[in-house]
């Protein structure tokens, strides 16, 4: 089982290094998203600078890589009776790969789309909670970072509510939530100072 766990960790981390915003901006837009806006290699910065339907491709790549990492973990440990634990190990690995990718000098995204994919894959109830909290915070303010932090907190609450009987899942869920909030620390500081940028996902953007 140790070899399986190592395999999950390796596969998850490598999948996490596949960054949708960087790949799409370089291969399809012939630019580098990291040279614009906040410099972050994530979906929101891509959308702010390019908009268009290609943003959906960015989101799909980051969503799918996290879901695949979880499924690989569940597959490798499922036969030993640890399917959910295997999925969570994959979730931890892919998040670390996304946030701190070795392929991109350990500077990646902030993990919200990955976290949503993890929630969808492990427990749809947590995904619904994250989705609702994101839009409750985002819609009246247009602050993606505020919605993201609210969603991350929902992630922790969800695992505490629905998986309190599994200490590994609960602690891991809270840890992923804490990491997501930490990755938004500069956004939180800008929110407090009133300097955070707004993003309207529903405003029509010119294609690039």
Image (cartoon, grey):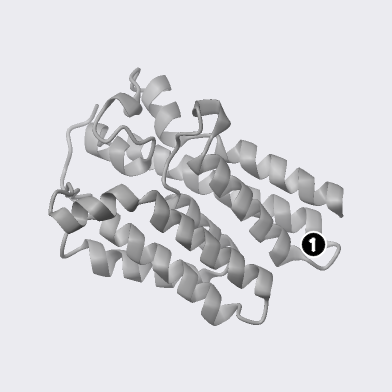
Q: Name which quarter of the figure residue 130 lies in.
A: bottom left
**Residue drawn 42% across the image and 41% down it:** 109
**Residue drawn 23% across the image and 49% down it:** 201
Q: Quadrant of the C terminus?
A: top left
Residue at the disc numbered 1: 78
Pinpoint residue 135: horizontal percent, then vertical percent.
28, 65
Nearest the viewer among 148 and 47 is: 148
**Image-based side of 60 in relation to 13, left or right:** left
**Image-based side of 129 in relation to 101, left or right:** left
Q: Quadrant of the N terminus?
A: bottom right
Q: Is residue 144 visible?
A: no
**Image-based side of 183 in relation to 186, left or right:** right
Pinpoint residue 67: horizontal percent, then vertical percent.
58, 52
The residue at the far top in this view is 30
Q: Is residue 12 visible?
A: yes
Q: Name which quarter of the figure residue 25 lies in.
A: top left
Nearest the viewer among 161 and 205 is: 161
| CA neighbours of label 1 inside 10 A, class few (<14), some (14 to 19), many (20+) | some
Pinpoint residue 197: horizontal percent, then vertical percent.
17, 46
Total count of labels: 1
**Residue drawn 19% across the image and 58% down it:** 192
């Amino acid at each position: 089982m140790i070899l399986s766990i190592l395999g999950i960790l390796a596969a998850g981390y490598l999948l996490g290094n596949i960054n949708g915003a960087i790949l799409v901006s370089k291969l399809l837009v012939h630019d580098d998203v990291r040279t614009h806006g906040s410099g972050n290699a994530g979906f929101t910065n891509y959308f702010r600078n390019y908009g268009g339907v290609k943003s959906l491709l960015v989101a799909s790549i980051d969503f799918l890589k996290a879901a695949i990492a979880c499924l690989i973990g569940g597959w490798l440990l499922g036969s030993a009776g640890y399917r959910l634990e295997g999925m969570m190990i994959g979730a931890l690995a892919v998040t670390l790969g996304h946030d701190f990718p070795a392929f991109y000098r350990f500077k990646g995204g902030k993990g919200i789309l990955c976290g949503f994919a993890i929630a969808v894959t492990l427990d749809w109830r947590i995904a619904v909670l994250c989705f609702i909290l994101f839009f409750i915070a985002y819609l009246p303010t247009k602050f993606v970072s505020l919605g993201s932090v609210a969603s991350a907190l929902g992630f922790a609450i969800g695992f505490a509510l629905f998986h309190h009987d599994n200490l590994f899942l609960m602690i891991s869920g809270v840890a992923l939530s804490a990491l997501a909030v930490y990755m938004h620390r500069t956004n939180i500081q800008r929110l407090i100072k009133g300097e955070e940028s707004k993003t309207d996902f529903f405003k029509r953007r010119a294609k690039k």
